[in-house]
Amino acid sequence: MLLSLVTPKKKFVTNLSVERVTLPAFKGQLTVLPGHSPLVTTLSTGVVKFKDSTTGTDHEFFVTWGYCEVGKNGIVVLAETAEAKSEINVERAKKALQNASAQLKNRTLDPKLIEKHRRKFVRAKARLDFAGTNSQTTH
């Protein structure tokens, strides 16, 4: 199977031969193996994992929202953002988590803003978890 993982700003992987791909699909984790039926799904915030067929190396990237298409020519992941562990800015993610948590405690916040800050909270917490940082804050 061939995998391409791209964002609007960067091509992370292009036509890489992989044994399997695990994705944070909209309704839960999805693993694609050779011979998988064609599909198109949206992605949630989470981790894309894949194993390089040539080297046997496992790779992981944190993604926020996007699409995945599984077809006869392979798997295409179009993500809004993608980051390797080494690219996660832990201090920025901690600050985003604290800011979102503080906003969510505001009892007079507009419902649309509550959802916006909830998504920011989830993304920041997931980034910290992916980076291996214990993010202690809960909401």
Image (tube, grey):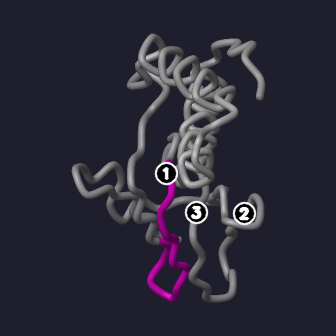
Q: Is residue 114 visible?
A: yes
* Residue indicated by mark 1: 54
At mark 3, the secondary structure is strand
Residue 89 on the magenta segment? no
Left or right: 89, with 121 as reference point: left
Residue 70 on the magenta segment? yes
- Marks 2 and 1 sit apart, C-alpha to C-alpha, by 19 Å
At mark 1, the secondary structure is loop
Q: Which mark is residue 31?
A: 2
- In primary-sequence order, the first of circles 2 and 1 is 2
Camera-nearest label, 3 or 1: 3
Where residue 73 appears, as percent x and y from the top left, is 44, 84
User: What residue type is disc 3 on?
Assistant: Leu
Residue occupying image coordinates x 39% and y 48%: 81
Q: Which mark is residue 135?
A: none
Residue occupying image coordinates x 36% and y 65%: 15
Residue occupying image coordinates x 27% and y 53%: 11
User: What residue type is disc 2 on?
Assistant: Thr
* Residue indicated by mark 3: 43
Camera-nearest label, 2 or 1: 2
Camera-nearest label, 3 or 2: 3
**Quarter of the image where one finds residue 123:** top right
- Marks 3 and 2 sit apart, C-alpha to C-alpha, by 13 Å
Left or right: 138, with 24 as reference point: right
- Marks 3 and 1 sit apart, C-alpha to C-alpha, by 26 Å
Q: Neighbour class for label 3 at 10 Å: few (<14), some, many (≥20)? A: many
- In primary-sequence order, the first of circles 3 and 2 is 2
